[in-house]
Image: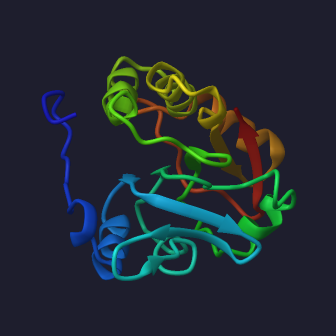
Amino acid sequence: MRRAGHDVEVLSCDDLLEVKDVGKDAQAVDIFYIMAHGTFDQAGYSVLLHAADWQPAVAGLGGAPRLTVAIFDTCKLLDSARVPNWRAVWAVAGIGPHLRLLLGFDGPAVIDRESALRGLAFAEDILAGVPFARAWVGAVAKTCGHSQYRRAVAIGIGNSPADAQVILDTASLANMPGPRGPGLHMEARY
């Protein structure tokens, strides 16, 4: 991403990552990517950090003035098998109008040598002009040899189902969507 001329901020790795820093960083970028442990239940989504859990919907995504795409390279951005009403859980999360796309996993993910290249595969595709949703699903397929851990999900966020679908189909580095109007609808692509 840097070689292509994009500003890239790297916050921290592993057990040094703190809730206060993650939330602050998510407020300051257009595209946010985090790789950690995660979980989803009726209470919502949490990123599991060393000292404390970060609940991005509660502490960082609601009013982010620039954040358009959030990539949660963690287990369980949602868990539709255990929480089939995942849209309702995310809908009460206070998602701000600028956030238009969530990328992650529906259920567990795997972290191994091959999947450690997922971010690189994703970045290469989006730099080549592939829309974010397709790039994410493709990067997971390319870097995960374990089919039970390869359920990538892209969630388009719009003011209508059609608007959310357009986000899934067209949002890219060259076509960053603006804030949505009133209403909150989410469409998922696997």
Front-lying residue, 146 or 12: 146
Colouring convention used in this rendered image of the protein: rainbow
Front-lying residue, 124 or 141: 141
Left or right: 95, with 50 as reference point: right
In the rendered view, would you say 108 is above or below 148? below
Left or right: 57, with 186 as reference point: left
Q: Where does the C terminus fall, quadrant-wise?
A: top right
Left or right: 35, with 39 as reference point: left
Q: Farthest residue in the right direction?
A: 84
Q: Quadrant of residue 137?
A: top right
Q: Where does the N terminus fall, quadrant-wise?
A: top left
Left or right: 32, with 102 as reference point: left
Q: Quadrant of residue 118?
A: top left
Query: How many discs appear?
Result: 0
Q: Residue at x 63, y 40 (%)?
A: 154
| x, y percent for residue 96 | 58, 68
Q: Residue at x 38, y 54 (%)?
A: 34
| x, y percent for residue 45 | 61, 68
Q: Residue at x 33, y 71 (%)?
A: 22
In the rendered view, would you say 121 is above or below 106? above
| x, y percent for residue 141 | 54, 22
Q: Residue at x 20, y 47 (%)?
A: 8
Front-lying residue, 132 or 139: 139
Q: Quadrant of residue 67?
A: bottom left
